[in-house]
Image (spheres, coloured by chain):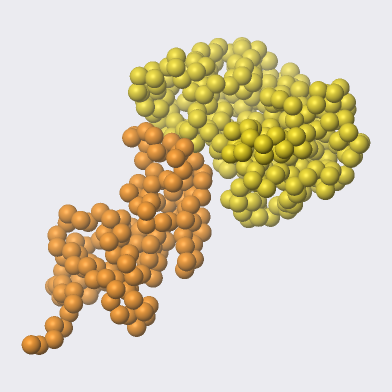
Chain colours: A orange, B yellow
Amino acid sequence: MNDRPYKVFKIDNGTVIDHISSRMALKIIDILKVQEQGIISIGINFNSKKIDKKDIIKIENVYLDKKETDLIALLSPNSTINIVKDGIVIEKRKIDMPKEIEGIIKCPNPMCVTNTYHDCSTKFIVVRYDEASTILRCYYCERETPVLPMLIQ
Amino acid sequence: MDFKNKSIISLRDLTKEEVEFILQKSDEVKSDKHPDALKDKVMASLFFEPSTRTRLSFESAMISLGGKVFGFATQDSSSVSKGETLKDTIKMVTGYCDVIIMRHPLEGASRAAQEVSSVPIINCGDGSNQHPTQALLDLFTIKDKFKKIDGLNIGLYGDLRYGRTVHSLSMALSHYKVNLYFISPKILQMPDHYKLYLNQCGLKYFEAESLEEVADKLDVIYVTRIQKERFADPEEFVKVAGSYKITLNTLGMLKKSAKIMHPLPRVNEIDTSVDNTEHAIYFEQAHNGIPVRQALLGLVTGGIR
Protein backbone atom coordinates (compact mmCIF):
# COMPACT_ATOMS: atom_id res chain seq x y z
CA MET A 1 0.00 0.00 0.00
CA ASN A 2 1.31 3.42 -0.99
CA ASP A 3 1.93 6.06 1.68
CA ARG A 4 -0.64 8.80 1.48
CA PRO A 5 1.14 12.06 0.62
CA TYR A 6 -1.20 14.16 2.74
CA LYS A 7 -2.78 13.50 6.11
CA VAL A 8 -5.01 16.53 5.54
CA PHE A 9 -5.91 16.64 1.88
CA LYS A 10 -4.65 19.35 -0.40
CA ILE A 11 -7.26 21.93 -1.36
CA ASP A 12 -7.44 23.77 -4.69
CA ASN A 13 -9.55 26.66 -3.46
CA GLY A 14 -9.94 28.17 -0.02
CA THR A 15 -8.02 29.10 3.12
CA VAL A 16 -5.23 27.12 4.78
CA ILE A 17 -4.33 27.95 8.37
CA ASP A 18 -1.00 26.37 9.29
CA HIS A 19 1.39 26.37 12.28
CA ILE A 20 -1.49 26.59 14.74
CA SER A 21 -0.44 26.09 18.36
CA SER A 22 -1.16 22.46 19.13
CA ARG A 23 -4.78 21.58 20.01
CA MET A 24 -6.16 25.07 19.29
CA ALA A 25 -7.67 24.07 15.91
CA LEU A 26 -11.19 23.38 17.17
CA LYS A 27 -11.29 26.60 19.17
CA ILE A 28 -10.11 28.54 16.13
CA ILE A 29 -12.95 27.10 14.09
CA ASP A 30 -15.29 28.34 16.83
CA ILE A 31 -13.78 31.83 16.69
CA LEU A 32 -13.98 32.00 12.90
CA LYS A 33 -17.58 30.74 12.91
CA VAL A 34 -16.99 28.74 9.73
CA GLN A 35 -18.53 25.48 10.95
CA GLU A 36 -21.25 25.62 8.36
CA GLN A 37 -19.28 26.99 5.44
CA GLY A 38 -18.05 24.28 3.06
CA ILE A 39 -15.79 21.35 3.85
CA ILE A 40 -13.28 21.79 6.65
CA SER A 41 -10.31 19.44 7.17
CA ILE A 42 -8.61 19.55 10.51
CA GLY A 43 -5.28 18.07 11.59
CA ILE A 44 -4.26 17.99 15.21
CA ASN A 45 -0.86 17.28 16.77
CA PHE A 46 1.14 17.06 13.54
CA ASN A 47 4.92 17.11 13.80
CA SER A 48 6.33 20.51 12.91
CA LYS A 49 9.90 21.63 12.29
CA LYS A 50 8.99 25.15 13.43
CA ILE A 51 6.92 24.61 16.56
CA ASP A 52 7.31 20.92 17.57
CA LYS A 53 3.60 20.02 17.43
CA LYS A 54 1.06 21.91 15.39
CA ASP A 55 -2.52 21.89 14.16
CA ILE A 56 -3.68 22.69 10.65
CA ILE A 57 -7.07 23.72 9.21
CA LYS A 58 -8.11 23.77 5.55
CA ILE A 59 -11.40 25.40 4.65
CA GLU A 60 -12.53 24.67 1.12
CA ASN A 61 -14.02 27.40 -1.06
CA VAL A 62 -14.00 29.97 1.72
CA TYR A 63 -11.66 32.95 1.43
CA LEU A 64 -11.27 34.49 4.86
CA ASP A 65 -10.31 38.15 4.91
CA LYS A 66 -7.57 39.64 7.06
CA LYS A 67 -9.94 40.96 9.69
CA GLU A 68 -11.20 37.44 10.20
CA THR A 69 -7.83 35.68 10.22
CA ASP A 70 -6.38 38.26 12.63
CA LEU A 71 -8.75 36.86 15.26
CA ILE A 72 -6.59 33.71 15.27
CA ALA A 73 -3.92 35.80 17.02
CA LEU A 74 -5.94 35.50 20.23
CA LEU A 75 -5.17 31.78 20.50
CA SER A 76 -2.24 31.13 18.22
CA PRO A 77 -0.30 34.27 17.25
CA ASN A 78 2.29 32.42 15.13
CA SER A 79 -0.14 30.78 12.73
CA THR A 80 0.27 31.40 9.01
CA ILE A 81 -2.42 31.85 6.38
CA ASN A 82 -2.36 30.74 2.74
CA ILE A 83 -5.13 31.69 0.37
CA VAL A 84 -5.33 29.13 -2.45
CA LYS A 85 -7.06 29.60 -5.81
CA ASP A 86 -7.05 27.01 -8.61
CA GLY A 87 -4.33 25.06 -6.83
CA ILE A 88 -1.99 28.07 -6.51
CA VAL A 89 -1.19 29.98 -3.35
CA ILE A 90 -2.22 33.51 -4.32
CA GLU A 91 -1.59 35.11 -0.93
CA LYS A 92 0.65 34.27 2.00
CA ARG A 93 -0.57 36.24 4.97
CA LYS A 94 0.73 36.94 8.46
CA ILE A 95 -1.70 37.55 11.25
CA ASP A 96 -1.64 40.68 13.39
CA MET A 97 -3.18 41.14 16.82
CA PRO A 98 -6.48 43.03 16.46
CA LYS A 99 -6.98 46.15 18.61
CA GLU A 100 -10.54 45.26 19.57
CA ILE A 101 -12.53 42.03 19.74
CA GLU A 102 -16.28 42.17 19.36
CA GLY A 103 -18.71 39.41 20.30
CA ILE A 104 -16.40 36.38 20.36
CA ILE A 105 -15.21 36.26 23.94
CA LYS A 106 -17.39 36.07 27.02
CA CYS A 107 -16.52 38.37 29.92
CA PRO A 108 -15.49 36.25 32.94
CA ASN A 109 -16.85 38.85 35.37
CA PRO A 110 -20.30 37.61 36.45
CA MET A 111 -21.28 41.18 37.37
CA CYS A 112 -20.47 42.51 33.88
CA VAL A 113 -23.48 44.01 32.10
CA THR A 114 -22.78 41.79 29.06
CA ASN A 115 -23.60 38.68 31.11
CA THR A 116 -27.12 39.83 32.00
CA TYR A 117 -28.76 41.53 29.03
CA HIS A 118 -29.20 39.72 25.73
CA ASP A 119 -28.98 43.02 23.83
CA CYS A 120 -25.53 43.81 25.20
CA SER A 121 -22.83 41.96 23.25
CA THR A 122 -19.22 41.81 24.42
CA LYS A 123 -16.34 43.99 23.35
CA PHE A 124 -12.72 43.84 24.49
CA ILE A 125 -9.66 46.02 24.03
CA VAL A 126 -6.35 44.18 23.58
CA VAL A 127 -4.21 45.63 26.35
CA ARG A 128 -0.96 43.69 25.91
CA TYR A 129 0.28 40.35 24.62
CA ASP A 130 3.32 38.17 24.35
CA GLU A 131 4.10 34.60 23.29
CA ALA A 132 2.49 33.17 26.42
CA SER A 133 -0.74 35.13 26.77
CA THR A 134 -2.99 37.89 25.51
CA ILE A 135 -4.59 40.24 28.02
CA LEU A 136 -7.91 41.90 27.19
CA ARG A 137 -9.84 44.63 28.98
CA CYS A 138 -13.61 44.48 28.88
CA TYR A 139 -14.87 47.67 27.23
CA TYR A 140 -17.83 47.67 29.63
CA CYS A 141 -16.77 46.51 33.10
CA GLU A 142 -13.08 47.42 32.55
CA ARG A 143 -11.82 44.16 34.11
CA GLU A 144 -8.73 42.63 32.57
CA THR A 145 -8.60 38.96 31.62
CA PRO A 146 -6.23 36.64 29.79
CA VAL A 147 -7.71 34.96 26.71
CA LEU A 148 -8.67 31.46 27.78
CA PRO A 149 -10.26 28.89 25.43
CA MET A 150 -13.15 28.51 27.91
CA LEU A 151 -14.13 32.16 27.34
CA ILE A 152 -14.82 31.67 23.65
CA GLN A 153 -18.54 31.89 23.03
CA MET B 1 -13.03 72.61 25.56
CA ASP B 2 -16.49 71.41 24.59
CA PHE B 3 -18.22 68.98 26.92
CA LYS B 4 -21.69 69.37 25.45
CA ASN B 5 -23.34 65.95 25.02
CA LYS B 6 -20.29 64.17 26.39
CA SER B 7 -21.06 61.32 28.80
CA ILE B 8 -19.07 60.92 32.01
CA ILE B 9 -18.63 57.16 32.35
CA SER B 10 -15.12 56.43 33.60
CA LEU B 11 -12.02 58.30 34.69
CA ARG B 12 -10.27 56.30 32.00
CA ASP B 13 -11.95 58.50 29.37
CA LEU B 14 -10.80 61.85 30.79
CA THR B 15 -7.51 63.56 29.93
CA LYS B 16 -5.67 65.65 32.52
CA GLU B 17 -6.76 68.81 30.70
CA GLU B 18 -10.40 67.72 30.90
CA VAL B 19 -10.10 66.89 34.61
CA GLU B 20 -8.50 70.29 35.28
CA PHE B 21 -11.21 72.03 33.26
CA ILE B 22 -13.94 70.32 35.31
CA LEU B 23 -12.19 71.33 38.55
CA GLN B 24 -11.90 74.93 37.32
CA LYS B 25 -15.58 75.06 36.38
CA SER B 26 -16.52 73.52 39.75
CA ASP B 27 -14.59 76.31 41.45
CA GLU B 28 -16.48 78.90 39.38
CA VAL B 29 -19.82 77.29 40.29
CA LYS B 30 -18.84 77.31 43.97
CA SER B 31 -18.19 81.06 43.65
CA ASP B 32 -21.69 81.57 42.16
CA LYS B 33 -20.42 82.45 38.69
CA HIS B 34 -22.99 80.30 36.88
CA PRO B 35 -26.43 81.01 38.39
CA ASP B 36 -29.30 79.48 36.40
CA ALA B 37 -26.85 77.40 34.33
CA LEU B 38 -29.35 74.52 34.43
CA LYS B 39 -32.50 76.58 33.94
CA ASP B 40 -35.21 74.58 32.15
CA LYS B 41 -32.96 71.53 31.81
CA VAL B 42 -34.47 68.22 32.83
CA MET B 43 -32.49 65.47 34.55
CA ALA B 44 -33.60 61.84 34.70
CA SER B 45 -32.32 60.22 37.86
CA LEU B 46 -32.24 56.44 37.36
CA PHE B 47 -31.17 54.54 40.46
CA PHE B 48 -31.30 50.83 39.73
CA GLU B 49 -29.48 50.48 43.04
CA PRO B 50 -30.27 52.63 46.07
CA SER B 51 -28.08 55.58 46.99
CA THR B 52 -28.57 58.42 49.41
CA ARG B 53 -25.70 60.87 49.06
CA THR B 54 -25.08 60.70 45.35
CA ARG B 55 -28.73 60.83 44.36
CA LEU B 56 -29.69 63.61 46.76
CA SER B 57 -26.64 65.71 45.92
CA PHE B 58 -27.31 65.41 42.17
CA GLU B 59 -30.97 66.28 42.64
CA SER B 60 -30.13 69.22 44.88
CA ALA B 61 -27.42 70.32 42.42
CA MET B 62 -29.93 70.33 39.56
CA ILE B 63 -32.77 72.07 41.37
CA SER B 64 -30.65 74.82 42.91
CA LEU B 65 -29.40 75.94 39.48
CA GLY B 66 -32.90 76.08 38.02
CA GLY B 67 -33.24 72.55 36.63
CA LYS B 68 -35.96 69.92 37.03
CA VAL B 69 -35.68 66.32 38.14
CA PHE B 70 -37.64 63.10 37.72
CA GLY B 71 -36.75 59.44 38.08
CA PHE B 72 -36.80 56.44 40.37
CA ALA B 73 -34.81 55.60 43.48
CA THR B 74 -35.07 51.81 43.40
CA GLN B 75 -35.29 49.20 40.68
CA ASP B 76 -38.60 47.88 42.09
CA SER B 77 -40.44 51.01 41.02
CA SER B 78 -39.24 50.81 37.38
CA SER B 79 -40.28 48.58 34.51
CA VAL B 80 -36.97 46.71 34.93
CA SER B 81 -38.90 44.58 37.40
CA LYS B 82 -41.12 43.58 34.44
CA GLY B 83 -38.08 42.31 32.53
CA GLU B 84 -37.27 45.33 30.37
CA THR B 85 -33.64 45.48 29.25
CA LEU B 86 -31.43 48.36 30.36
CA LYS B 87 -31.00 49.58 26.79
CA ASP B 88 -34.77 49.72 26.25
CA THR B 89 -35.25 51.67 29.48
CA ILE B 90 -32.61 54.17 28.37
CA LYS B 91 -33.99 54.51 24.82
CA MET B 92 -37.34 55.41 26.32
CA VAL B 93 -36.02 57.86 28.94
CA THR B 94 -33.80 59.77 26.48
CA GLY B 95 -36.95 61.19 24.95
CA TYR B 96 -37.95 62.80 28.25
CA CYS B 97 -34.83 64.62 29.43
CA ASP B 98 -31.61 66.55 28.69
CA VAL B 99 -29.31 64.40 30.82
CA ILE B 100 -29.45 61.02 32.58
CA ILE B 101 -27.68 60.20 35.83
CA MET B 102 -27.64 56.51 36.70
CA ARG B 103 -26.41 54.00 39.25
CA HIS B 104 -26.60 50.31 38.45
CA PRO B 105 -25.41 47.17 40.26
CA LEU B 106 -23.93 45.73 37.04
CA GLU B 107 -20.45 46.79 35.99
CA GLY B 108 -20.33 48.50 32.60
CA ALA B 109 -24.05 49.39 32.73
CA SER B 110 -23.47 53.12 32.13
CA ARG B 111 -21.20 52.40 29.17
CA ALA B 112 -23.88 50.15 27.65
CA ALA B 113 -26.53 52.82 28.30
CA GLN B 114 -24.41 55.49 26.62
CA GLU B 115 -24.41 53.49 23.39
CA VAL B 116 -28.15 53.89 22.92
CA SER B 117 -28.66 57.30 24.51
CA SER B 118 -29.12 60.53 22.59
CA VAL B 119 -28.51 62.56 25.76
CA PRO B 120 -25.37 62.52 27.91
CA ILE B 121 -25.13 59.97 30.72
CA ILE B 122 -23.35 60.54 34.01
CA ASN B 123 -22.27 57.34 35.76
CA CYS B 124 -23.10 57.46 39.48
CA GLY B 125 -21.57 54.06 40.17
CA ASP B 126 -21.61 50.80 38.20
CA GLY B 127 -21.10 47.88 40.57
CA SER B 128 -17.57 47.94 41.97
CA ASN B 129 -16.20 49.49 38.78
CA GLN B 130 -16.30 53.29 38.55
CA HIS B 131 -17.74 56.28 40.38
CA PRO B 132 -16.27 59.19 38.43
CA THR B 133 -18.19 62.08 40.02
CA GLN B 134 -17.04 60.98 43.48
CA ALA B 135 -13.42 60.90 42.28
CA LEU B 136 -13.78 64.37 40.78
CA LEU B 137 -15.25 65.81 43.97
CA ASP B 138 -12.45 64.11 45.92
CA LEU B 139 -9.86 65.75 43.66
CA PHE B 140 -11.68 69.08 43.94
CA THR B 141 -11.61 68.82 47.75
CA ILE B 142 -7.88 68.03 47.79
CA LYS B 143 -7.11 70.92 45.45
CA ASP B 144 -9.38 73.26 47.39
CA LYS B 145 -7.58 72.45 50.67
CA PHE B 146 -3.97 72.26 49.50
CA LYS B 147 -4.19 74.63 46.48
CA LYS B 148 -2.31 71.96 44.54
CA ILE B 149 -2.32 68.21 43.93
CA ASP B 150 1.21 67.60 42.59
CA GLY B 151 3.72 66.68 45.26
CA LEU B 152 1.22 65.41 47.84
CA ASN B 153 1.51 62.10 49.68
CA ILE B 154 -1.93 60.51 49.58
CA GLY B 155 -2.85 57.44 51.61
CA LEU B 156 -5.82 55.25 50.65
CA TYR B 157 -6.88 53.35 53.76
CA GLY B 158 -9.21 50.40 54.39
CA ASP B 159 -10.94 48.30 51.73
CA LEU B 160 -8.98 48.95 48.54
CA ARG B 161 -10.11 45.77 46.83
CA TYR B 162 -13.86 46.30 46.53
CA GLY B 163 -14.18 50.06 47.07
CA ARG B 164 -14.95 51.70 43.72
CA THR B 165 -14.25 55.18 45.10
CA VAL B 166 -10.58 54.34 45.69
CA HIS B 167 -10.33 52.77 42.23
CA SER B 168 -11.72 55.86 40.53
CA LEU B 169 -9.70 58.20 42.75
CA SER B 170 -6.41 56.43 42.08
CA MET B 171 -7.12 56.66 38.35
CA ALA B 172 -7.88 60.37 38.68
CA LEU B 173 -4.67 60.88 40.65
CA SER B 174 -2.69 59.10 37.94
CA HIS B 175 -2.72 62.43 36.06
CA TYR B 176 -0.69 64.06 38.85
CA LYS B 177 2.77 63.73 40.36
CA VAL B 178 1.67 62.29 43.69
CA ASN B 179 2.94 59.45 45.88
CA LEU B 180 0.20 56.97 46.71
CA TYR B 181 0.22 54.84 49.86
CA PHE B 182 -2.12 51.83 49.83
CA ILE B 183 -2.83 50.87 53.44
CA SER B 184 -5.04 47.81 53.79
CA PRO B 185 -5.25 44.29 55.19
CA LYS B 186 -3.70 41.74 52.82
CA ILE B 187 -7.02 40.35 51.61
CA LEU B 188 -8.34 43.82 50.74
CA GLN B 189 -5.32 45.10 48.78
CA MET B 190 -5.64 47.23 45.65
CA PRO B 191 -6.34 44.86 42.71
CA ASP B 192 -3.35 44.11 40.49
CA HIS B 193 -4.86 45.59 37.34
CA TYR B 194 -5.16 49.00 39.00
CA LYS B 195 -1.56 48.77 40.20
CA LEU B 196 -0.50 47.86 36.69
CA TYR B 197 -2.42 50.85 35.31
CA LEU B 198 -0.68 53.16 37.78
CA ASN B 199 2.69 51.65 36.87
CA GLN B 200 1.99 52.35 33.22
CA CYS B 201 1.15 55.96 34.11
CA GLY B 202 4.49 56.22 35.92
CA LEU B 203 2.87 56.82 39.32
CA LYS B 204 4.71 55.75 42.47
CA TYR B 205 2.79 53.73 45.03
CA PHE B 206 3.74 52.00 48.24
CA GLU B 207 1.83 49.31 50.08
CA ALA B 208 1.53 48.93 53.85
CA GLU B 209 -0.61 46.91 56.22
CA SER B 210 -0.73 49.43 59.04
CA LEU B 211 -1.12 53.18 59.16
CA GLU B 212 1.75 53.47 61.68
CA GLU B 213 4.24 52.50 58.97
CA VAL B 214 3.51 55.57 56.86
CA ALA B 215 1.37 57.94 58.99
CA ASP B 216 3.97 60.71 59.39
CA LYS B 217 4.41 61.03 55.61
CA LEU B 218 0.80 61.55 54.62
CA ASP B 219 -0.87 64.81 53.57
CA VAL B 220 -4.20 63.11 52.93
CA ILE B 221 -5.69 59.93 54.41
CA TYR B 222 -8.65 58.72 52.40
CA VAL B 223 -10.53 56.32 54.67
CA THR B 224 -12.95 53.68 53.38
CA ARG B 225 -15.21 51.34 55.27
CA ILE B 226 -14.30 47.67 55.67
CA GLN B 227 -17.46 45.67 55.14
CA LYS B 228 -18.38 42.55 57.04
CA GLU B 229 -19.60 40.68 53.95
CA ARG B 230 -16.08 40.68 52.48
CA PHE B 231 -14.92 38.24 55.17
CA ALA B 232 -15.66 34.51 55.26
CA ASP B 233 -14.72 34.38 58.95
CA PRO B 234 -16.69 36.84 61.15
CA GLU B 235 -13.96 36.77 63.83
CA GLU B 236 -11.39 37.81 61.26
CA PHE B 237 -13.62 40.76 60.35
CA VAL B 238 -13.88 41.91 63.95
CA LYS B 239 -10.10 41.69 64.33
CA VAL B 240 -9.29 43.52 61.07
CA ALA B 241 -12.01 46.18 61.30
CA GLY B 242 -10.99 46.91 64.89
CA SER B 243 -7.44 47.69 63.81
CA TYR B 244 -8.48 49.92 60.89
CA LYS B 245 -9.92 52.80 62.85
CA ILE B 246 -9.07 56.46 63.10
CA THR B 247 -9.37 57.76 66.66
CA LEU B 248 -8.02 60.78 68.55
CA ASN B 249 -4.96 58.62 69.35
CA THR B 250 -4.28 58.08 65.66
CA LEU B 251 -4.13 61.83 65.07
CA GLY B 252 -0.94 62.09 67.15
CA MET B 253 0.92 60.10 64.45
CA LEU B 254 -0.12 62.46 61.66
CA LYS B 255 1.36 65.68 60.31
CA LYS B 256 -0.40 68.72 61.76
CA SER B 257 -1.53 69.70 58.27
CA ALA B 258 -2.78 66.21 57.32
CA LYS B 259 -6.43 65.96 56.24
CA ILE B 260 -8.76 63.00 56.65
CA MET B 261 -11.27 62.28 53.89
CA HIS B 262 -14.04 59.68 53.59
CA PRO B 263 -16.63 59.11 50.82
CA LEU B 264 -19.28 58.43 53.53
CA PRO B 265 -21.33 56.74 54.90
CA ARG B 266 -19.06 56.34 57.88
CA VAL B 267 -19.92 53.62 60.39
CA ASN B 268 -17.23 53.45 63.05
CA GLU B 269 -13.99 53.53 61.07
CA ILE B 270 -13.57 57.19 62.05
CA ASP B 271 -14.47 57.92 65.64
CA THR B 272 -16.94 60.82 65.94
CA SER B 273 -14.49 62.55 68.31
CA VAL B 274 -12.30 63.20 65.24
CA ASP B 275 -15.07 65.20 63.51
CA ASN B 276 -14.35 68.47 65.29
CA THR B 277 -10.60 68.44 64.71
CA GLU B 278 -8.86 70.37 61.93
CA HIS B 279 -7.92 67.09 60.28
CA ALA B 280 -11.52 66.15 59.45
CA ILE B 281 -12.75 67.39 56.07
CA TYR B 282 -15.18 64.59 55.13
CA PHE B 283 -18.39 66.57 55.55
CA GLU B 284 -16.92 69.46 53.58
CA GLN B 285 -15.92 66.86 50.98
CA ALA B 286 -19.53 65.65 50.77
CA HIS B 287 -20.76 69.24 50.39
CA ASN B 288 -18.35 69.74 47.48
CA GLY B 289 -20.46 67.16 45.66
CA ILE B 290 -22.88 69.98 44.84
CA PRO B 291 -20.62 72.39 42.90
CA VAL B 292 -18.75 69.55 41.16
CA ARG B 293 -21.99 67.88 40.05
CA GLN B 294 -23.46 71.23 39.04
CA ALA B 295 -20.39 71.91 36.92
CA LEU B 296 -20.66 68.47 35.29
CA LEU B 297 -24.40 68.83 34.62
CA GLY B 298 -23.83 72.31 33.21
CA LEU B 299 -20.95 71.20 30.99
CA VAL B 300 -22.67 68.16 29.47
CA THR B 301 -25.99 69.96 28.88
CA GLY B 302 -24.27 73.02 27.43
CA GLY B 303 -25.36 75.41 30.21
CA ILE B 304 -21.74 75.96 31.25
CA ARG B 305 -18.96 76.39 28.71
Q: Position of residue A83 (x, y in %)?
A: 24, 69
Q: In this view of the protein, which residue sits in the foreground, A10 or B40?
A: A10
Q: Position of residue B100 (x, y in %)?
A: 50, 23
Q: Residue furthest bottom?
A: A2
Q: In this view of the protein, which residue sits in the foreground, B1 or B185?
A: B185
Q: Quadrant of residue A30?
A: bottom left
User: Image check: B250 left or right of B202?
Assistant: right
| Whether residue B303 is visible | no
- Position of the C terminus of chain B, as image quadrant, is top right
Question: Residue shown at 72%/38% (left/top)?
Answer: B239
Q: Quadrant of residue B161?
A: top right
Question: Residue shown at 10%/88% (left/top)?
Answer: A2
| Whether residue A59 is visible | yes
Question: Residue shown at 53%/26% (left/top)?
Answer: B103
The total number of labels drawn is: 0
- Position of the N terminus of chain B, as image quadrant, is top right
Q: In this view of the protein, which residue sits in the foreground, B285 or B273?
A: B273
Q: Residue furthest left?
A: A1
User: Image check: B303 left or right of B46?
Assistant: right
Q: In this view of the protein, which residue sits in the foreground, A91 or B234?
A: B234
User: Image check: B79 left or right of B274?
Assistant: left
Q: Position of residue B225 (x, y in %)?
A: 69, 32
Above or below for B299 versus A79: above
Question: Residue shown at 37%/57% (left/top)?
Answer: A149
Q: Position of residue B199 (x, y in %)?
A: 66, 55
Above or below for B67 versus B131: above
